[in-house]
Structures are given as structure tokens and as C-alpha cells.
Amino acid sequence: MTTLDENNFRTIVDELYDGLYFVDRRRKITFWNKAAEKITGFKAEEVIGSSCADNILTHVDEAGNNLCQGHCPLAATLEDLAPRATQVYLHHKLGHRVPVSVRISPLTDDAGEVIGAVELFTDISNHRANELRVKELEQLALIDKLTQLANRRYIESQLEKHLTEFQRTRLPFAIYFFDIDHFKQINDSYGHDAGDEVLRFLSKTLIDNARPFDLYGRWGGEEFIALIRNLDADNLLSFGERLRMLVQHSYLQWGNERLAVTISLGGTLAQSDDTLDSLVKRADRLLYTSKKNGRNRLTIG
């Protein structure tokens, strides 16, 4: 059995998507990985050697309590050796708050004596943005209750808004019109409850992989629209293909069976003379082409 040397260990932890840092018993930071730099904006050399009690990241909780100078979960783990998990807001070097999911574990030596702790933290800003969007849409009755996506009314209003902005700024945006292939067979074979669950898990796939400024909505039945900002012709195909692939590789466990579905899509960029009707109809025609050519595919134009 081989063991990891220090260089291999550093390579592995620097490849993590999650921020990770070590502290000694006095909460002095001894290691800070690349993801921690990316999430916080602080380089390793700016934090290593300082104490997390120095308030560099000024973690606060939902109530705004400063955790670094008071109710610090990392300090508590150093005292009782109990692992902890929580959500906090850290201070980014550029000044804004970043919501993160935090997991803390004690570090002990061969004799079982505590020598420090490790904290792993994940940027959950996209999830928080989606949660806030859902709450806002619920208050305005602009959400589809089954899927938790924007409803048709809201999608139409946002398309109108973006078309107006496009006429003025020429900042590109795209829409994808898509639906679930052979959805009627799901309902006929497994019942409408299964169909509803398929709609939910597809929508969750969209939500979990959305950027904060992407908007997904249920147009009706098994039809959906994605409104994607800052997308140009070079990325229209790759973004749509990623969306198609994510759905294709998702599945729902229904009893002893896995229910997997595919989607057919039509993708198009807004044009200078577009109206809401012309933009949606063009995407719908492209969707029909995908259906005609075999389904589970994207057609752009």
C-alpha cells in the first residue's frame, strides 16, 4: 500500500472545487487551497499565519452574528472534537458576502490529541439566489407550483423586458424552447403521479445547474423555456447541448425502475426586429425540427 507524499497531497487538495483550510490548536491558519482563494478572493499568502479569530473572513450567520469573534463553530470543534456542519456568510476580499456551506472536522495525532481542525466550505450562492427567486415569485403568484419554476406569465413579462433592453443595449440573449420527448407514454405507462415527479426532477436539474441570472420557466404541460442572458452565437450550441446532456443523464427512481427522459430543443438568439411572438415562434419551429429529426437533439437558428 502506497502513501501520499506532501506534494501529492497538495496537488489533490488544490484540485478540489471546495475551499479547504487547516488551523492549528490556536486557530492559526496553516493551509489554504486554491478553491479557498477563488471563493474568498484572498490568496494563501494573505491568510496563512494569521488566526481565523483575526476576523479576515468575518463569518456571520443568518442573524448577522459575527462568528469569528464569538460563536465560532470551528473553535467549538477544537474544544469538544465534534464535527459540525452549518451555513454562514463569509466576507469576500472585494467586499460582498458569499453564502457558503461549511463542514468542520477535528485533526488529531496518533495519540488522539487534538492538533487542529480542517474546514471545507462550498459556495452556495447560486442555490441561495434560486431560493430567493422562488420566494419572490411565490409572493407575486408568478411561479409554477408543481415545478417551482417561473410560470408562463412571468416568462412572457421577462421576454418583453429583455427585448426592450436589447433594442437599446444590443446585449445578446438567447431562448431555448424545449419539451420532454414521449411524455405521454410516461403518463400512460406509470400514471400521472409519475409524470408529475418527472416534471419535478427535470426542473430540479435545471435549477441546480442554473447561473443566478438564468431563468427557466414552465410554458405549459411538458413544455419549457429557458431565457439565457449574455449568450452569443459561439455559445448557443454548447449551452443547449449541455442542457440536453444534463437531462439525458438524470433519472428518477420509480419503484424498481429508473425513469429517464430526454428533451428536444430549439435555440435562438434575439434579433433586432423580434417581438415576443416572433422570438417564441422561431424557437418553437426549431424545436419541431428537432422532433422531426429524431428527438433528443438541439436545433439552433
Image (cartoon, helix red, strand yellow):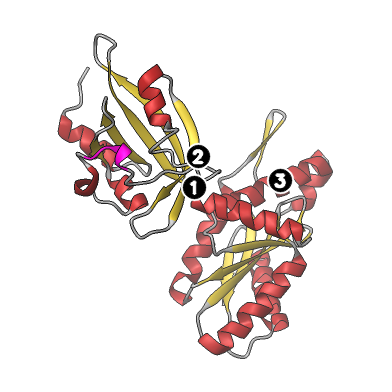
The number of numbered badges drawn on the structure is: 3
- Residue nearer the viewer, 252 or 61: 61
Q: Amino acid at mark 1?
A: Ile
- Residue nearer the viewer, 298 or 102: 102
Q: Residue at x 83, y 44 (%)?
A: 192
**Residue ID for mark 3:** 198
Q: Secondary structure at mark 3?
A: helix
- Secondary structure mostly seen in magenta is helix
**Residue ID for mark 1:** 124
Residue 299 has which mark?
none
Q: Amino acid at mark 3?
A: Val
Whichever of labels 1 and 3 marks the residue nearer the N terminus, that label is: 1
For residue 2, above or below residue 156: above
Q: Quadrant of the N terminus?
A: top left
Q: Secondary structure at mark 2?
A: strand
Q: Is residue 190 magenta?
A: no
Which picture quadrant has residue 130?
Answer: bottom right
Q: Amino acid at mark 2?
A: Gln
Q: Residue at x 76, y 66 (%)?
A: 152
For residue 20, above or below residue 160: above
For residue 31, above or below residue 90: above
**Residue ID for mark 2:** 87
User: Dot 1: within a 10 Å radius of its alpha carbon, few (fewer than 14), some, or many (20 or more) residues?
Assistant: some
Q: Which residues are magenta?
A: 50-54
Q: Secondary structure at mark 1?
A: loop
Q: Quadrant of the C terminus?
A: bottom right
- Residue nearer the viewer, 4 or 82: 82
Foreground tag (2 vs 1) = 2
User: Dot 2: within a 10 Å radius of its alpha carbon, few (fewer than 14), some, or many (20 or more) residues?
Assistant: some
Which picture quadrant has residue 17?
Answer: top left
Judged left or right of residue 30, residue 299 is right
Report whether residue 2 is seen. yes
